[in-house]
Image (cartoon, rainbow, N blue to C red):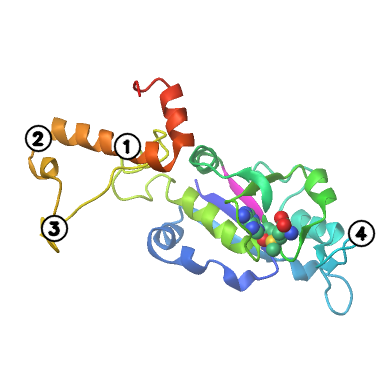
């Protein structure tokens, strides 16, 4: 069955963008997923197809209007809670996107994504449509389009048949939850730097142990938050 993505944006030409290339592009051609982009401005008001207005309470910038956004959402999904697909609003105020959530989304029927711009979106349409608010990280982008591309890329590669090696998603960072071990390829010595000896030994058990230890040490140093989750999961003693 085709995984269906709808994107609502005032910059429709930003799609499919990078998702038309490589794995995602091939998967779209093969019918593993489909993309429909809706221009929010088609639902804009007046001669200028206006989509935004000044914020109540004052302050800088403009806010996307709830009536315009609701009409745009209604054009792709009936009812208050979109359709069977989750309606996701990309916003720095949202819950941080995780591999776990991406996996759940990839296992579902698809997503409807609403891209913010300017200062953001009138909260009432988010509440009325019971949208899920998702952030892709603690920094501010100029709009939700790139955040949508990130979410879609992460989900599409998990769709059945999209990734080359069937098991490559299983070992990846955040599945454990550990960051991945470092990778090396030929030449075995480059710029006077040799590949770690174990990796050229052919001893599969030793290689697996080396990789696990490297993953644990990297996670411990770089992401103590993830490492604590790993320890709490009881996978291994510290
Ligand atoms: N005034 C907002 C704030 O301080 O939280 C920032 C608005 S931002 C300039 C415009 C739009 O970009 C947002 O409405 C949202 O759709 C998108 N955006 C920016 N950063 C994001 C992030 N980290 N994750 C998801 N979407 C983001």
Task: Give left or right: position of 70 versus 210.
Answer: right
In the rendered view, tell whether residue 123 sits above or below residue 209.
below
Would you say the residues marked 4 and 3 are in contact, meaning their CB atoms lie under 8 Å apart?
Answer: no
Q: Is mark 1 within 8 Å of ligand 1?
A: no
Look at the numbered disc 4 and give the secondary structure of its residue. loop
Mark 1 vs mark 4, CA separation in Å:
50 Å
Dominant secondary structure (helix, strand or loop) of the stretch shown in magenta:
strand
Q: Earlier in the sequence, mark 4 or mark 2?
A: 4
Quadrant into which the C terminus falls: top left
Q: According to the image, label 1 marks what residue? A: 217
Per the rendered image, the range of residues in magenta is 109-113
Is 110 magenta? The answer is yes
Q: According to the image, label 3 marks what residue? A: 186
Mark 1 vs mark 2, CA separation in Å:
21 Å
Q: Earlier in the sequence, mark 1 or mark 3?
A: 3
* Mark 2, other Cα within 10 Å: few <14 / some 14–19 / many ≥20: few
* Mark 4, other Cα within 10 Å: few <14 / some 14–19 / many ≥20: few
In the rendered view, tell whether residue 163 sits above or below residue 54.
above
Question: Which residue sits at x=42%, y=34%?
Answer: 177
Q: Position of residue 222 (x, y in %)?
A: 41, 43
Q: Earlier in the sequence, mark 1 or mark 2?
A: 2
Q: Position of residue 109 (x, y in %)?
A: 57, 43
Is 3 magenta? The answer is no
Question: Which residue sits at x=68%, y=53%?
Answer: 91
Look at the numbered disc 1 and give the secondary structure of its residue. helix
Considering depth in this image, is 9 or 194 the residue closer to the camera? 194
């Amino acid at each position: 069955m085709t995984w269906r993505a709808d994107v609502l944006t005032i910059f429709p030409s930003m799609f499919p963008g990078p998702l038309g290339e490589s794995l995602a592009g091939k998967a779209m051609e093969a019918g593993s997923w489909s993309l429909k982009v809706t221009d929010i401005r088609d639902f804009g008001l007046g001669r200028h197809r206006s989509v935004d207005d000044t914020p109540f309470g004052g302050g800088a910038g403009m806010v996307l209007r709830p009536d315009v956004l609701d009409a745009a959402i209604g054009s792709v999904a009936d009812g208050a809670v979109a359709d069977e697909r989750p309606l996701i609003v990309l916003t720095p105020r949202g819950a941080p996107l995780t591999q776990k959530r991406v996996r759940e989304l990839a296992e579902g029927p698809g997503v409807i994504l609403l891209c913010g711009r300017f200062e953001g979106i009138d909260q009432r349409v988010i509440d009325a449509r019971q949208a899920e608010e998702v952030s892709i990280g603690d920094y501010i982008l100029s709009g939700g389009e790139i955040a949508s591309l990130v979410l879609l890329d992460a989900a599409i590669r998990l769709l059945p048949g999209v990734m080359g090696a069937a098991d490559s998603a299983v070992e990846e960072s955040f599945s454990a939850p550990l960051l991945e071990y470092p990778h090396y390829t030929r030449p075995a010595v480059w710029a006077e730097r040799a590949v770690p000896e174990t990796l050229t030994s052919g001893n599969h058990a030793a290689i697996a142990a080396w990789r696990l230890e490297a993953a644990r040490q990297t996670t411990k140093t770089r992401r103590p938050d993830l490492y604590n989750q790993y320890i709490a999961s009881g996978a291994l003693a510290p």
